Amino acid sequence: MERAEELDSLAEKSDDEIILQIQGGDRRSYDLLVKRYQRRIYFLALRMARDHDDADDLAQETFVRAYFAIGSFTIGRNFYTWLYRICMNLSINYLNKRKFVIPVSRISDESDPLERAAGGADPSDELISKETTAKVESAIDSLSPKYKAVLVLRVYEDMSYEDIAKTLDISVGTVMSRLFRARQKMLEALEEYEG
Amino acid sequence: MKCERFNKSISLYLDGRLGETDERALREHLSTCPRCADTLSALEAAQKAAKATRAAEPRAGYWDVFSGRVIERIDAEREIKARSPLRDFAAKILPAPGRRLSLAAGVASIALAVVVGVLYVDRQGGRVVPPGAQAPAEREEVPETARDTRIAEESREATVGEPKLQELTDVQKETDAAGAPAGTQTETPAVAAKKDASPTDAKKESSLSGGANEPRTVAIKSVSADKPAATPEAPAKPAEQTKADRSAETPVSVGGATELTQAEKSTETPRPAKRETETETIAADKMERSRAVSFNAADKRAGVEPPMESYMVGGIALQKIADQDTLIAADELRALIATWKSHIEGNPTDSLNSEGYRQVAVAYCLLARQSGDEAVISEGAQVIRSYLGQAEDHDVKEFLSAKLEEIEGLREK
């Protein structure tokens, strides 16, 4: 009961305050940080892996890694960006290892965890056919992990070049050139699908 | 040619990153170039389509148990870390409950004793005198040879040249801990293997089991920050010194507990036997530094002590092994191989890999020598051969070639 109250009070605290508490030895507070970011990390991993089970594994691993490294986390820096960085690196490594390619047959797979054009915030989204979004998704998936990573962070996460650079530990110039290449390759893949 | 110039601008324009002048130039170009205009509209459409996708929520109740599962995995991993066979062994044999000693410390003290013995024999003009047969006062009277002095001096220089833990900035440490570069990898070797073999089955198992029985790496630290003690920036040393150095850096033995403690203390309270004090101080310095550098705060809080000389691989302090470490248990060697292999696979460009190649090769040779098993020899030879193909550094290649020859030689035997 007391612990529940303690967690409630922690819920109002900033990331840094909670991290300081964890670094001070109260490891149980980590649960709160996990709850705070679990959705964002899971969905980021899902964008990269395109599979629930893999995304689940990547998200779990992200939090496990972060836990063991939190002792050296510098207060004042953005914890969320740090988590993103761990998650993206895990995802890139995972995709590299899997030589990840989404089979074209998956395009019409109803079990795909990404729902297409299912009434997004923008009403004009509904005008975009499922087929089109499926092709675009597939084109993005065909990119090599490093290109896919910049595109996912830019397009889905709406991150600035600077944040992408921090997350992927690359320069802003590299972000620009990777985005350019990623887009070129995506268009080439789309042209291929168009036949 | 003109279009190529604008290709990059189109990408920047989509992200609103184009400067005013460049944007004007692009617009002018687009008005006269239908091909580039098509590219822009295709990209805009594709981006819009991509944004139109929404990720489906996972099954009901998923979020309620997510953090609990993370905590379970963390607990399992801490247990694994704390259950190292070497530490168990050290814990059993040590009289003082609070003081644990890794195998490495013991080896260091034995080697230290051997070096002291060798120097002692030298001073006696080649006459072997049993340890303890001569009082410390007598030893002091023996004049120092030029070689002894050089060893001490060079060792000191090497020590001065090495970076210290305090020099690592917080930023460096954090970056290292985040483990980031597409190099941060690290799935559990078992999970990785499962995925390679059968992704679907592996997924379920890994997410449910939480990897309780699997060695897992956690956060990779960079080589430069982690391992200064292993690669001192000192000039090349003569053969004699290598021997002395090894005594300071190499591991093992039980009785080493007391000697190490003395060596550590010697930095504060100099003892009468000058040469011994110097050698011990150097040894203690090196060990302490190596331990400090490779031991991150998270491990400390988790109550996990790293080996005396180690590499941080995925947040785990992996013992540095050498050919003479024949006492290391087979399962310890296998765990070491698995962790290194997983790191190398996941971080193909990591600069730590060159050490990983060597360590895996040494581990396989030790394992093959212990077991004499044909399967181990074949597996080892295969892995070393593949690393030989991956390694870029000439020295590493040479080392691996020698190891390949060695392990294949075992087969013939």
Image: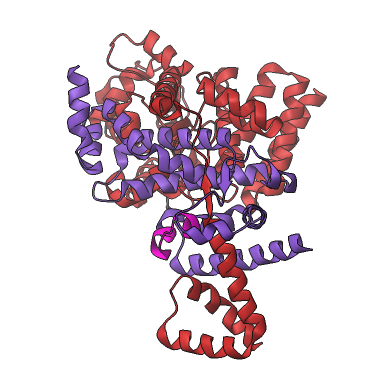
Chain colours: A purple, B red
Residue situated in front as seen by the camera: B19 or B76? B19
Residue at image position (49%, 76%) is B13
Kindly identify the residue that appears in the image at 31 percent across and 18 percent down.
B258
Closer to the camera, B4 or B189?
Answer: B4
- Residue at 39%, 63% in the rendered image: A162
B296 over A193 or under it: above or below: above
Q: Residue B229, can we see it?
A: no
* Residue B120 or residue B64, whichever sits in front: B64
Is B114 one of the magenta-colored residues? Answer: no
Quadrant in which the N terminus of chain B is drawn? bottom right
Is residue B336 among what the camera can see? yes
Q: Is residue B84 left or right of residue B188?
A: left
Q: Residue at x 29, y 28 (%)?
A: B301
- State which region is magenta: A153-165
In the image, A195 versus B175, the foreground residue is A195
| Residue lying at the far right of the rendered structure | B412
State which quadrant residue B266 falls in.
top left
Q: How many marks?
A: 0
Whether residue A70 is situated above or below residue B102 in the rendered picture? below
State the quadrant of the C terminus of chain B: top right
Estimate the x, y position of residue B355 in percent, counting from the top left: 55, 42
**Magenta stretch, main secondary structure class:** helix
Relative image position of residue B286 (x, y in whole percent): 36, 38
Report x, y in % for residue A98.
66, 42
Q: Position of residue A93 (x, y in %)?
A: 57, 45
